[in-house]
Amino acid sequence: MKNFAILSDGTVYKNDRHFRTLEKKLAREQRKLSRRQLIAMNKKIKLSESKNYQKQKRKVARIHEKIANKRNDFLHKVSTEIVKNHDVIGIETLQVKNMRQNRKLSKAISEVSWSEFFRLLEYKADWYGKTVVKVGKAFASSQLCSSCGHQHKDVKHLGLREWTCPGCGVHHDRDVNAGLNLKQEAERILASSTVGTTGLA
C-alpha cells in the first residue's frame, strides 16, 4: 500500500499513512486509558466520576480526531485536484469489503479510505460538471498489456510490481499500466456517448 492512487499519465499520490504516524502514540495512550479504567473499577468508582479516566479518555479522543482530520484533508485535496484537472475520471470498482478479508492488508486498506475517496470524486465531478466512469471489477486492469492487450496472469500476484509483456516486449510498471488500461476501458465505455475524453485520468 505504498501509493494511494496512480493516474494513467504516471502521476503518483503517495499513501499518506496518517494512522501509522500516530499509531504508537495512540496505542500508548489507549493502554493508559485501560489502566485507569481498571484502577477505577478496583476502587469501585464510576467511570463517569473518575477524573483521571475521563481526562485520559479525552486525550485518546483527540488523537482519533487528529487522525480523522488529517485523512479527510488528504482525501479532499487529492479528489479536488483530480476532478479539476480532468474532464473524465475512470475508476476501478473495488470490492473493498472483500479486500479487507486479507488479514495482511485489511488494516492498510481500511486506513486509505477508498470508499470515501470514490464518494468524494463522484459528488465533486457532478459539482464541476465532470464525468466519473466506473470500470467493472472483472476487468483485468493489472494483467493486460496496455500496448498490445496480452493478458499476463502471473501479474495476479501483488508482489510483482514490474513486468515485461511476453507478447510485445514492452516493460510495465504494474500500477501505471493498470491506469492506462482503465483509461482505455473508460474510453471504450464512453465511445457511444457525446462526452469527450480530453484530460482523461
Image: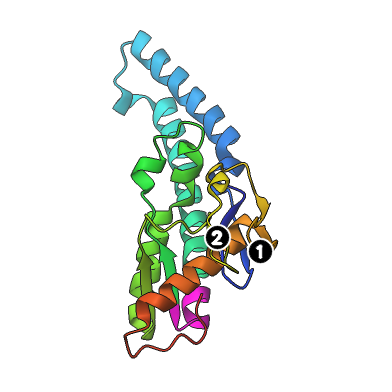
Q: Amino acid at mark 2?
A: His
- Residue toward you, 63 or 134: 134
Dot 2 crowding, Cα within 10 Å, few <14, some 14–19, many 20+ = some
Residue 154 location (% of width, % of height): 57, 44
Q: Is residue 192 left or right of residue 27?
A: left
Q: Amino acid at mark 1?
A: Cys
Q: Which residue is mark 2?
A: 150
Q: Is residue 131 magenta?
A: no
Dot 1 crowding, Cα within 10 Å, few <14, some 14–19, many 20+ = few
Residue 120 location (% of width, % of height): 38, 67
Secondary structure of the residue carrying tag 2 is: loop
73 relative to 43, above or below: below
- Residue toward you, 56 or 27: 27
Is residue 154 in sight in this rendering? Answer: yes
First along the sequence among labels 2 and 1: 2
Is residue 125 in sight in this rendering? Answer: no
Q: Name the residue rendered at 37%, 55% in the picture.
A: 138
3D distance between C-alphas at marks 2 and 1: 8 Å
Q: Name the residue rendered at 42%, 14% in the picture.
A: 39
For the residues bearing labels 2 and 1, Cβ distance under 8 angstroms: yes
Residue 168 location (% of width, % of height): 66, 64
The image quadrant of residue 125 is bottom left
The image quadrant of residue 178 is bottom right
Q: Which residues are magenta?
A: 81-88
Secondary structure of the residue carrying tag 1 is: loop
- Residue toward you, 154 or 190: 154
Q: Is residue 127 left or right of residue 77?
A: left
Q: How many marks?
A: 2
Q: Is residue 84 magenta?
A: yes
Report the residue that reaches farthest toward the top: 42
Q: Which residue is mark 1?
A: 168
